[in-house]
């Protein structure tokens, strides 16, 4: 049993050493996210309120900056807004990726969501709204979103 424990410690140290700095990932509290999104001028952007963006983040990632979801087409969705590697970021594994935001997908997995917001704004601007996000269409569009910003 002792040799297995000794083998596990070096492996853990190697994994910690290769983890990029600032890549902890966090769950952003709802009201903090509201403040961040307002600071980045998302209220009214492409005709949507901050509540729409908070609802989108809730249903895409549960406010988790480290969220990753694998898709059937071989692409993955990354970060708090679940930005897709087929069209918007480069992950080195998605066939035919176009990297529309000119960024590596791992940048969407840290606790600084400024780059996530910048890319999400580009996606929303090109689509003239939040329709590219399935979770927004399914859970947020046409709904009372006041609870997502209430008390913030």
Image (cartoon, helix red, strand yellow):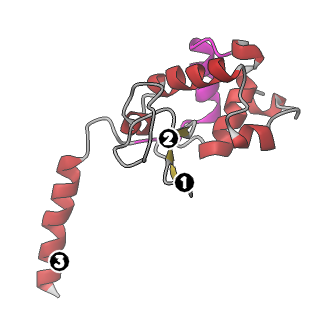
Q: Of callouts 1 and 2, which one flags the residue occurring earlier in the amino acid sequence?
A: 1
Element marked by disc 2: loop
Rendered residue at 17%/81% (across/down): 4
Magenta residue span: 25-42
Q: Of callouts 2 and 3, which one flags the residue occurring earlier in the amino acid sequence?
A: 3
Which quadrant does the C terminus fall into?
top right
Which quadrant does the N terminus fall into?
bottom left
User: Label 2 belongs to which residue?
Assistant: 86
Residue 117 on the magenta span: no
Asked if 47 appears above or below 76 in the picture, the reply is above
Label 2 vs label 3: CA separation? 40 Å
CB under 8 Å between discs 1 and 2: yes
Label 1 vs label 2: CA separation? 9 Å
Element marked by disc 3: helix
The quadrant in which residue 112 appears is top left
Rendered residue at 63%/15% (across/down): 38
Q: Position of residue 49 (x, y in %)?
A: 75, 20
Label 1 vs label 3: CA separation? 39 Å
User: Label 3 belongs to which residue?
Assistant: 5
Q: Position of residue 57 (x, y in %)?
A: 63, 37
In the displayed structure, does residue 135 sit left or right of residue 98? Answer: right
The residue sitting at the front extreme is 96
Asked if 41 appears above or below 28 in the picture, the reply is above
**Which of 56/75 is in front?**
75
User: Label 1 belongs to which residue?
Assistant: 73
Asked if 73 appears above or below 127 in the picture, the reply is below
Badge number at residue 150? none
């Amino acid at each position: 049993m002792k040799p297995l424990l000794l083998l596990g410690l070096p492996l853990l140290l190697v994994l910690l050493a290769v983890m990029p700095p600032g890549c902890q990932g966090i769950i952003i509290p709802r009201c903090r996210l509201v403040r961040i999104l307002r600071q980045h001028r998302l209220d009214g952007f492409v005709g949507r309120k901050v509540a729409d963006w908070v609802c989108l983040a809730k249903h895409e990632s549960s406010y988790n900056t480290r969220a990753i979801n694998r898709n059937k087409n071989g692409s993955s969705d990354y970060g708090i807004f679940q930005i897709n590697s087929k069209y918007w970021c480069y992950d080195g594994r998605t066939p035919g990726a176009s990297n529309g935001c000119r960024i590596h997908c791992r940048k969407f997995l840290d606790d600084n969501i400024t780059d996530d917001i910048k890319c999400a704004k580009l996606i929303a601007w090109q689509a003239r709204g939040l329709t590219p996000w399935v979770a927004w269409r399914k859970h947020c569009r046409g709904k009372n979103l006041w609870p997502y910003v209430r008390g913030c």
